[in-house]
Structure formats: structure tokens, C-alpha cells
């Protein structure tokens, strides 16, 4: 992953957190805010290095925790856990298939809030486990499943715009024989 991809990933994380904080439409319609950071983490874990996964987990998690009621760092640990698990098993995932992107996004978007709730249960801020919490968890998981293929498409388009494209092959073979005559 080059610098442009790292910067664009961190910019996308900043925009995702800004969207979650400022737009309350999902919260009003579905009763839960859809988190876009797990979808972004799926893309980074499947297409870049472990240092990029850690950078996104730290920056994105701290940005999100600074606007939420969570203790600082809880989301960072959850994002790092999901990203590390996906990064080490990325050879098994068909990352170019939309079905695999949706299912991986569903898994990550379900794992991150579940691990945050689990960390909060064992901390000094217990969370009551209710049916409303289960509904919010389902909305977050389904929203992340929808957002993950969109993240893959967005970064593929950015790659086409800002990176060099390979040239098409020449119509001549490299092993062709050229007959030369005197005239």
C-alpha cells in the first residue's frame, strides 16, 4: 500500500466518523447509527499491510471514541481485533467477489460492536443487554454488510484515477522473426 492509499484510507475514516456524528437519519429511521469503520477495516485488512490495519484502527477508533460515550480506546481495540483476524486469513477470502465482501462486512460489522459491548460489560460501565440492543446490533451489522462492497468499489475507482494503468500488449509478439533482405 503506497502513501496515496494510506492517506485516502485515513481520509475516508475521517469522513466516515464525521458522517456518523453529523447525520442522524439512520438513528432516527432505524434506531441505530450505522458504523462505516468496520467496512473500511475489511477493505484495508484484505488489501494492505498489517501496519495500515493498525493505523486505521488507532486513528479511526480514537476519532470515533472521542465523539461517543465509550471510554477512549475501546473501539480501537475492537477494530484492531477484527482487522488483524481478517488480515491473517485474507488468503482464504475471495476479496474480488461481491458475495464474499458482503459476508465479510457482515462479520466485521457484527464483531466490532459485539466486542465493544463485551469490553464495556467487563469494565466499570456495564451495558444492559436488551432486545433494543440486539436490534441495534443487527442494524449495524446489515449496514456494514451493505457498505463493504461500496468501499471496495470506491477504492478501486480511486486506484484507477490516481495510479498508473498498465499499457496494453503490443500486437507484435516478442519472439517474432524479422527477415531482412539486401533490397
Image (cartoon, rainbow, N blue to C red):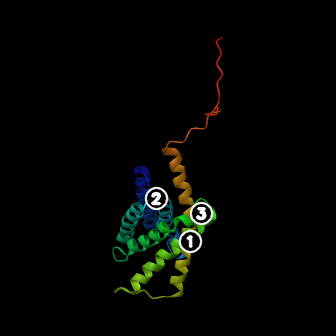
State which tag comes first along the sequence, 1 or 3: 3
Please report whichever mark, 3 or 2, sits nearer to the chain's N-terminal start. 2
Distance between the alpha carbons at the discs numbered 1 and 2: 20 Å
State the residue position of label 2: 48
State the count of labels: 3
Helix, strand or loop at disc 2?
loop
The residue shown at (42%, 74%) is 78
Relative image position of residue 7 (x, y in whole percent): 40, 53
Q: Is residue 9 above or below residue 115?
A: above
Mark 3 → mark 2, Cα distance in angstroms: 15 Å
Q: Position of residue 27 (x, y in %)?
A: 51, 73
Work out which quarter of the rendered image holds the N terminus and state it.
bottom left
Q: Which residue is mark 3?
A: 94
Q: Which residue is mark 1?
A: 106
| Badge 3 density bin: few <14, some 14–19, many ≥20, Cα 10 Å | few
Find numbered disc 1 in the image and state the secondary structure of the residue it sits on: helix
Question: Mark 1 near mark 3, Cβ–Cβ under 8 Å?
Answer: no
| Foreground tag (1 vs 2) | 2
- State the separation of the CA atoms marked 1 and 3: 15 Å
Residue 36 seen: no
Is residue 85 visible in this depiction of the protein?
A: yes
Left or right: 156 as drawn, with respect to 122: right
Using the rendered view, name the quadrant where residue 180 is placed.
Answer: top right
How crowded pointer 2 is (Cα within 10 Å; few <14, some 14-19, many 20+) is rated as some
Amino acid at each position: 500500500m503506497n502513501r496515496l492509499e494510506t492517506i485516502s484510507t485515513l481520509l475516508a475514516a475521517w469522513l466516515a466518523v464525521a458522517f456518523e456524528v453529523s447525520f442522524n437519519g439512520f438513528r432516527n429511521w432505524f434506531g441505530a447509527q450505522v458504523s462505516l469503520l468496520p467496512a473500511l477495516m475489511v477493505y484495508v485488512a484484505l488489501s494492505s499491510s498489517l501496519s495500515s490495519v493498525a493505523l486505521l484502527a488507532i486513528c479511526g477508533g480514537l476519532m470515533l471514541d472521542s465523539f461517543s460515550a465509550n471510554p477512549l480506546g475501546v473501539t480501537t481495540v475492537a477494530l484492531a481485533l477484527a482487522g488483524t483476524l481478517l488480515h491473517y486469513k485474507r488468503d482464504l477470502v475471495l476479496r474480488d467477489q461481491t458475495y464474499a465482501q458482503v459476508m465479510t462486512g457482515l462479520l466485521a460489522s457484527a464483531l466490532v460492536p459485539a466486542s465493544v459491548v463485551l469490553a464495556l460489560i467487563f469494565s466499570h460501565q456495564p451495558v444492559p443487554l436488551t432486545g433494543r440492543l440486539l436490534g441495534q446490533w443487527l442494524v449495524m451489522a446489515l449496514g456494514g454488510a451493505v457498505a463493504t462492497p461500496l468501499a471496495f468499489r470506491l477504492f478501486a475507482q480511486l486506484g484507477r484515477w490516481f495510479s498508473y494503468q498498465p499499457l496494453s500488449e503490443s500486437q507484435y509478439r516478442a519472439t517474432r522473426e524479422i527477415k531482412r533482405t539486401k533490397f
